[in-house]
Image (cartoon, helix red, strand yellow):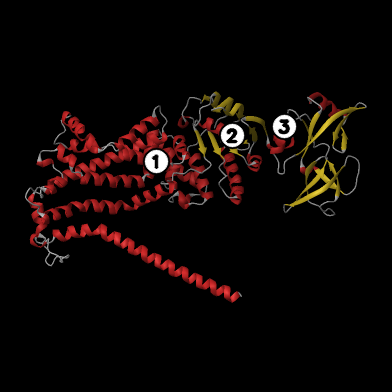
Amino acid sequence: MAKLEIKHLTKRFGKTMAVHALNLHVKDGELVVLLGPSGCGKTTTLRCVAGLETPDEGEVWIGDTLANKLPPKDRDVAMVFQTYTLYPHMMVYDNLAFPLKMRKMPKQQIDLKVKKIAEMLRIKELLDRKPAQLSGGQQQRVALGASIVREPKVFLMDEPLSNVDAKMRTQMRVEIKKLQQDLNITTLYVTHDQVEAMTMGDRVALMDGGVLHQYSTPSEIYSNPANTFVASFIGSPPMNLVNCSVIEREGLLILEFQNWSFTLEKNLAEMVCENAKGSELVVGIRPEDLKLHSHQERNRFKGKIYGFEFLGREFIVNVEAVGTILKVVTQDVSGFKVGDTAWVSFRTDKFRIFDKKSGVLVL
Amino acid sequence: MADTIFSQRTTWNRIKMVVGTIRRIWAHILLLTIGFIVLMPFFWMITISLKPPALIYVPPHLIPIHFEWQNYVKALEAAPFARYYLNTSIAALCIVTGQLLFSSLAGYAFARLHFPGRNILFLILLSTLMVPFYITLIPSYLIVRILGMVNTYPGLIVPFLVSAFGIFLFRQYYIEFPKDLEEKALMDGCSRLQIWRHVFLPLSKPPLAALGIFAFLFAWNSFLWPLVVTTDPDMWTIQIGLAMFSGRYGTEWTSLMAGTTVSVIPAIVAFIILQKYYIRHLALSARLG
């Protein structure tokens, strides 16, 4: 087991900057998820760690070894690809044994290791089958086994669940996480699925445009997004973002929305003044932190019900208010129908404020 | 109204069935005709090989009344056919092995390795396909003579160990391989040669079979090059041996046909064994093309 350190990693493809000055530290035994939309540079980062791409700048440290000049086979990393990638002409046993055979391990030792891994992953009865005879989930377990069998220092996973059906994905997420914890392997996991990221990662590195936007625990990323990109990417539905301007009146800081205003408390006002770069701000609030009411009270703003989305255990209510369409997650919509007026309240400890120009979190 | 629509549909389905049956009958007639045209020469060859010399020009005895098995004995005794068989077998085996090995290796290099001048080299290779064999016949003979390979197995084999067509075939096949497979093998500790040996080659049955059949048939049926490069009868191949039955004053047809029948057997057996993979290769090429 080893830590993984990425220092100032930069990779270009022609004129396109795929990864820009990335710094990432993965602790020994930690599972870090590289999350982001397609083309954000997460797979390129993974491939640079694996040795399948050569960085233009920067360093990759695996344990205490600078890996930049090492070929993939000498880095002691194992990779699970998106398409499972098993050798189709070999039986499952041979697929598991192949990496060990290439390292010239004695046959008996190979046999012991293969059977041990097969037992752990519950694929012992599949050893004499070919990959084409396996289901998607079985193939994924074999692919995992073929990577684990080498006992690598670092485990790299490139969207391993993207080709698996939704039901199997839920099951495999738990299995992969448990396996990683049991084996305590340092793991770098790439995905575009935030549910995978939030449920599996010890920490999440959210990337976009080759740049790292935030690197923290799932709860931290969810509660305190570093900027508007993080706020709008994480969460389903994502955080509501509403433009406003900030004005000072009689010594108080007031957030001016369309048809409504909100006075900030003194301590919050001080923080906003300190960190905000201009008078244009963006207020963010999670859908579950908004509530619908039938009558007006203090710190409630007026809205009009735009539509309902029924998800089984809850509703997403679309409310037209403060110049935008807000999403409110609630379990009770009794008394409301489309077109009705509703009064919306919010938890004052849960809203966030971002600078509109830079998008950076201010409060 | 519903009844009218239903009966119209039933009539239309019946018409479609009849048209389909007629189409299938025509397809069978066409295929049987082509099959007959292709197989007739073979049948004629075997028929003549089993007839007495006097009866070969006399129709309508398509099937011999008496089977003259002596024709075969006479043919095989007329010349050292066992030796010719041996020479041809050695040459064919070596040529097939060489072409499969080098074509697969070179095809892998052109398809998956990146080196300076790769594309230009490949174009040059392809351009050699446009040069007819007869143009290079004399220069090739001169080189073989300088190297002292006249009347030797190397003389028969070496010029045909590499095939531009074979390299092209494998290159096109390997280009379609998923990149992930190769990268996984790299991560598993394989060198490039090991990737070819453990991953690409085992998955190459269709092009191996296709090129194997081509190479074998070429080597087995080769006449001009062995004739040019061998003067010693002990080094002659089977095609040269068969040509001896045609003289200035006539042709011993029954012996020729008997010898030809025997010489054709290995080619037919090779095709029967490998046809499954050859057809799979054709189907793959059609799908990817």
**Identity of the amino acid at label 2?**
Lys
Q: Amino acid at mark 1?
A: Gln
Distance from Cα at disc 1 to Cα at disc 2 = 32 Å
Provide the residue designation for mark 1.
B172
Residue that extends furthest to the right in the rendered view of this protein: A250
x and y, in percent, of residue A81 in the image:
52, 40
> Residue A283's spot in the image, x, y percent?
79, 35
Q: Chain of mark 2?
A: A
Seen at 88% across and 39% down, the residue is A299
Q: Disc 1 is attached to a residue of which chain?
A: B
Q: Amino acid at mark 3?
A: Asn
The picture quadrant where one finds residue A180 is: top right
- Helix, strand or loop at label 1? It is helix
Q: Which mark is residue A227?
A: 3
Q: Residues within 10 Å of mark 3 (few under 14, many from 20)?
A: many
Please give the name of the residue rendered at 16% of the width and 28% of the height, measured from the top-left corner: B146
Q: Are marks 1 and 2 in contact (CB under 8 Å)?
A: no
- Chain assignment, label 3: A
In percent of the image, x 36 and y 30: which residue is there?
A: B121
Query: Which quadrant of the figure contains the C terminus of chain A?
Result: top right
- Give the left or right position of residue B132, taking residue A270 as reference: left
